[in-house]
Amino acid sequence: MIEKPKGTNDFLYPESSARQRVVSLITEIFEIFGYRPIETPIFEYSELFKISAGLASDIVSKEMYEFLDKKGRNLALRPEITAPVVRAIIQNNLVNELPIIKLYYVGSIFRYEKPQKDRYRQATQFGIEFLGLENEFADFEVIYLAHKIYQLLGIQTEIHLNTIGCIKCRINYRNQVYEYFKKYQSQLCKDCNRRLEQNPLRILDCKEQSCKNISLNSPKSIDYICTDCKKHFQNLLEHLSNHNIPIIQNPLLVRGLDYYNRTVFEVKYQGVDLAGGGRYDYLVSMISKDKYNIPAVGFAGGLERLVNTLQQNNLLSKILNEKTRIALISLCDKADKIILNLYMRISSKLTEKKINNEFEIHLLKFDNLSKALKSCNKLNLNYAIFVGEEEISNDEITIKNLDTGKQEKIKIESFLPLVFQNLFSLSKYSTNYSDF
């Protein structure tokens, strides 16, 4: 048997449905705040990621899937999506839409790393990019939305936050960090010895315990940033505090990509990183030949890690059970026409009113009621609506509440108005559908 590649997943029900429900909720929130969807290719020229993420980053030095195509062009499966989004903005002249560009994405990323819990070689990222606003309001909105999404899903996160300064003041900070770690060079891991010369700030992101211990007493960025960067950070902290967004200042936080500046943050739950992001005011000019000067900030979260966290906290069932599930069942050939007519009328209303995310409708046919109800239970349905010989002889239809076991018979001519006005109001949502 041919098996799936190591570090990849097959997502089956109920997890596959949970993933779709979570993505739907996330994208609905993004759109409420004015973000618009964007899709980019899953592979790009390797140079894009080497320029943006940096040669010293783990993504480029260890994890990137690179390959030559049939004409010898150096390509890579995207290891992250911010750089491709910025490339798309430039290439498609979206800079003409400034002063504000707000985009969101959901898509696959690929990183060659040792597969382990919540870390896969193919994963799904969702995120937003906010370009055009230099002040801390953009930072605030991105951090707020990152926090809000997890909060709405029932996960109480905390935001770890730091500032690493701008392109001018970070030079001094970088030099201080270099001099500090140079003294401990013999104690640093092999990767950090390489990072010391390429980008010493990357050492602060090392996961080796020995390097983490050395980092504890390293210079702190807040002591070396310029007045403007310090003001930006203090204003951001004040806004977040005033609106009760849980913040933990982490002076060692730098993130793993070179394009970040000023604000960097991570969304954590019980020590697990669920998302991260920050400012990247120079990324557009790094990629563009025209050297556009466009401030930007964004964040990205991992869908697999989010869904696994929901599962561990018994929150998946709540997401999956929010729908009202209905079956329309014919129990004999004579009932087919009635059931099909009802099915078409109800499904038409659901799609017309765009409330199909709140309901799940099944069209079934069985030769006896016992088989039908067993199938309904396996499908975890809420209502079974059926017509058999007895119902036909009395011009009736039977509705059975599968949660309570209660059932009642209703005249067929009265059924649709009653369903549209009453049954739909029993949706797991509180929406009033009396306008049917």
Image: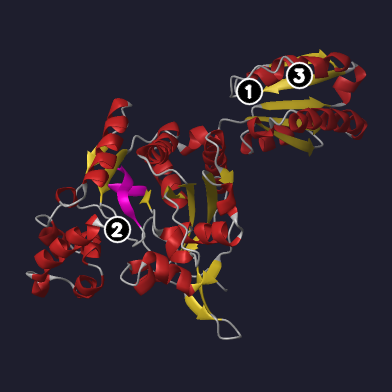
Give the number of the mark in front: 1 or 2: 2
Does the residue at mark 2 contact the one at mark 3 (Cβ under 8 Å)?
no
Assess disc 3: are there few (<14), some (14-19) or many (≥20) residues with their C-alpha within 10 Å of its C-alpha.
Answer: some
Q: Which residue is mark 3?
A: 420
* Observer-nearest of 106 and 129: 129
Percent of width and height locating residue 207: 23, 61
Under mark 1, the amino acid is: Ser
* Residue at point 37%, 47% (across, down): 274
Q: Which residue is mark 2?
A: 167
Q: Give the position of the C terminus as an image quadrant.
A: top right
Percent of width and height locating residue 149: 44, 37
Percent of width and height locating residue 309: 39, 44
Element at badge 2?
A: loop
Assess disc 1: are there few (<14), some (14-19) or many (≥20) residues with their C-alpha within 10 Å of its C-alpha.
Answer: some
Quarter of the image where one finds residue 422 = top right
Quarter of the image where one finds residue 435 = top right
* Observer-nearest of 134 and 431: 134
Element at badge 3?
A: helix
Main SS of residues in magenta? strand
